[in-house]
Image: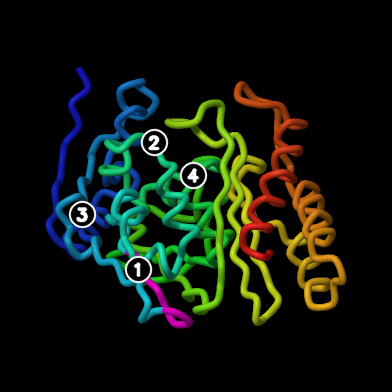
Amino acid sequence: MYEPQWKRPTSKAEALAVLGDVGEDAVVVAGGTDIAPLISKCRIRPRLLVDISRVDDLKLLNVGPGSKGGSAAIGAMVTHGALARDEGVSEVAHVLAAACRTVGAPQVRARGTIGGNVANASPAADGAVALVALGASAVVESDGNGRREVPLPEFFLGPGQTVLRPGELVTGITFAAPSSVARSAYRKAGQRNALAIAVVSVAAVHEPEAGTVRIALGSVAPTPIRATEAEKLFESGWLDASDRAELLGAVAAAAARDASPIDDIRASAWYRTVLVEVLTRRALEEVCL
């Protein structure tokens, strides 16, 4: 019978020390909403589970009106439910709160963490897509190599794959908070209205004073991605556009070209491409018009 060892550190320093000692033989457990199903289905068999749920150092949330235009920080152990409910997050980073409200059921949102959402590197991860649109970085720490910040597009390498080295832990997320006039939106399509993995998701953050937009796409590439060509088209035409609705349609079409979806059991590549254009246009109309 499979019986892994457990460690339950109560501080970040203790957690990093444990991971530094065991390296590749350990799997970190935060909320357990992704790890527990993998273990129950015999897909992974780690020798050691490091439960960081008691590490209060990783539960800090610094996103609020005071962070507008400055730096925002979220501890890895902050849950989707906490982010969905927090008034400061809704005001400063609405796209993240909106994305977290779509995660699973209330029980999953109460347990699942933003650090786990990022570290598990699913192309469909709701919180991760919103964070990519916010220009966020993962804060990565280890006992021996200190601290580094990795922009999320560089952090993700593929489905379930990241730049994390043995002994490293995602301890938080940081991003430059949008300005007080910025607007953001999250759009998601699944096979049902709730408890659905995204067939396609789109996050958009518009800075009207700068005439810029960041567009992130989920479930249409091996990792959450930025629709960079669509963003360039928006920025080149927004300030001079005589018909902004027409421009947003062109930007949405460009976002569909930025995507590289595949056929799988949830949707065809063709359908996903259509959804990218539709959802991007809806998100842009919400934040720009």
| Tag 3 residue | 18
Label 4: element kind: loop
| N-terminal label among 2 and 3 | 3
Label 3: element kind: helix
Circle 4 residues within 10 Å: few <14, some 14–19, many ≥20: many
Residue displayed at 41% across by 49% down: 100
| N-terminal label among 3 and 1 | 3
User: In the drawing, what numbered circle is on residue 88?
Assistant: 1
Q: Quadrant of the N terminus?
A: top left
| Tag 4 residue | 125
Q: Is there CB contact under 8 Å for labels 2 and 4?
A: no
Residue displayed at 49% across by 52% down: 128
| Tag 2 residue | 104
Circle 3 residues within 10 Å: few <14, some 14–19, many ≥20: some
- Give the alpha-carbon distance from disc 2 to disc 4, as whole Å: 11 Å
Magenta span of residues:
68-74
Residue displayed at 75% across by 39% down: 273
Tell me if residue 283 can be seen: yes
Give the x, y percent position of residue 62: 31, 72
Please identify, in this view, whether the residue under mark 1 or under mark 2 is nearer the observer: 1
Query: Amino acid under label 3?
Result: Val
- Give the alpha-carbon distance from disc 1 to disc 2, as whole Å: 22 Å
Residue 195 versus residue 133 in the image, above or below:
above
Give the x, y percent position of residue 233: 81, 65
Query: Amino acid under label 2?
Result: Gly
Label 2: element kind: loop
Q: Is there CB contact under 8 Å for labels 4 and 3?
A: no
Quadrant location of residue 60?
bottom left
